[in-house]
Amino acid sequence: MKKYNNRIFTVLFTFIGLTFISSCTDDLNITPEDDQTVLSEELFEDENAYKEVLAGVYANLSLTGVDGAGSSNIQGLDAGTSQYGRVLVYLQTLSADQMIWSYENDPGVREIQRNIWTSGNPLLYGMFGRASVSVGFANNFLRETTDEKLDARNVSASVRSDIVAFRAEARLLRALAYYHLMDLFGKAGLVTENDPVTNFNPPQAERAQLFEFIETELKAVENDLVDPMANEYGRADKGVAWMILAKLYLNAEVYLGTDRYSDCIEYCNKIIGGGYSLAPNYLDLFKADNNISAATNEIIFPLISDGLTTQNFGPTTVMINGAVGSIEKNGVSLGVGEGGWGGALRVRKQFADLFNGGAFLTDTRNTLMTQDRSDIITDISDRDEGFIIAKYSNVGSTGTPGVDQTFVDTDFPLFRLADVYLMYAEAVLRGGTGGTIGEAVTYINMLRTRANNPQSITVTELTEDFILDERARELHWEAHRRQDLIRFNRFTGGNYNWAWKGNASNGIAIPAHFNVYPIPSNSMASNPNLTPNPGY
């Protein structure tokens, strides 16, 4: 079982979810003003309620509703189109050069993986909506923990001291949601706990304003967060704040047109000095017990999945069941049903090509299964075409399978130390100060050594093209690829084409405005302050 208190994680999400839904408008407008939640004063007669309500904010990252894995508290969206981690993987990975989903009748999938999306795509609505709900839940918690309310409730001094860190965590989770909204959509309605609860449409904030808000919030709460690796499993600490800031700064030229690589290195150094260490075995990071194995020393922040207590159709459930091959029927080895989901997921040729060459024969990051398969997918619906992959597993590091053969125990590593090493190397290579090229090479070679790859690199071999490829080899299917391709000017246009890019089997150029997704039409209908992104 998870170290995280799952009773809190699920029971309070149920409570908050029910209260949230009943207090919103009938059509449940999925914009940040939807934090119209009134929690009962009776709840707070028990001082443990503050931690439990905070758990509800975390729960929105894993759960979708109050009635099991298939339920959703977002009207008009099912659990598969609104689970936070799943839609994040779809928008960051399925839209790029690593992954193909066989069943294009699933809502929204065809348009995302062929790069032909519109503002009506339900997966875009699901991501925008789920992130907005995170903002709403965080705002609610902050409203309920003001000094005035704590004074009125005569909350004890010991609990009040804990609430300082609790509030910092809530603000961090809100910043995380805005980080994803900013990266994916370029803008969003900006609302805080200080705004009115009812009859309020939040003003639209563009990327620069969201960037400043996220940066300011994370720096403001840094000292109130617990030290890296000192919190309960699954909760945020200083390391998570530093990670989001490092990500902001690495991508600042995309977001703002401004070089912030030195700032990226500064925060990478903070994380590297925070006590994290690489898991000895790469694949242990993606197994059913990655919450209790040595993987926890590398995973900076996970999205929780549990086959018993927090069942969900999240990214690891999807990727493990989906990775079972239609030919191989290798589900038992992955800890799920023998046939899994019948060959739902495969990889595109361009990703498979990154593991060509003798150095990658023993590389533990290379989990491609190629026997009796071609690397080319000419027909997306033909599940026998294309290689499959066995990166994620519902089997623990000791060989024990998860408790359920559909809903997996494997947590999704949203942030981990290996990414920090790669960010450091890239920021140094791009001219950032505060680091050295020699240290960058050392970090890259640590990853290669961990992966049992005999080919160490030298300073002259550390190029931007190498970094982009190595990020794919190390971080594939972890919701980074679209962002990486945009930063390297390889996502839109025709500099780099991959199979089925732009709805062509060999790939074609796509327009530059596809570097951000359209604001969902349903979200604009809910909040008239939101306007379409250019080109849509």
Image (spheres, rainbow, N blue to C red):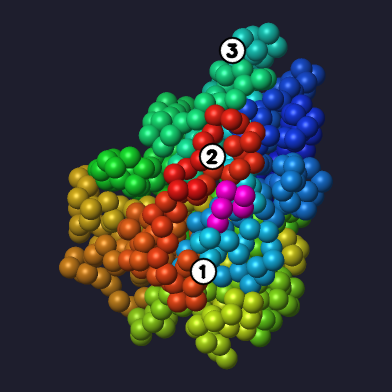
Instruction: Name the mark on residue 177.
Output: 2
Name the amino acid type tagged 1: Asn
- Other residues around mark 2 within 10 Å, as few (<14) / some (14–19) / many (≥20): many
The answer to whether residue 409 is visible is no
Q: Residue furthest right?
A: 67
According to the picture, the residue beneath numbered tag 1 turns out to be 503
Query: Which residue is pictured at 73% across the width and 78% down the height?
Result: 338
Above or below, 465 against 381 in this view is above
The amino acid at mark 3 is Asp
Q: CA distance from mark 3 to mark 1?
A: 55 Å
The answer to if 120 sits in the magenta stretch is: yes
Alpha carbons under labels 3 and 2: distance apart: 25 Å
Q: Which residue is mark 3?
A: 147
Q: Is residue 342 left or right of residue 251?
A: right
Q: Are the residues tagged 2 and 1 within 8 Å (C-beta)? A: no
Three-letter code, disc 2? Ala
Residue at point 59%, 30% (across, down): 528
Residue 145 falls within the magenta-colored stretch:
no
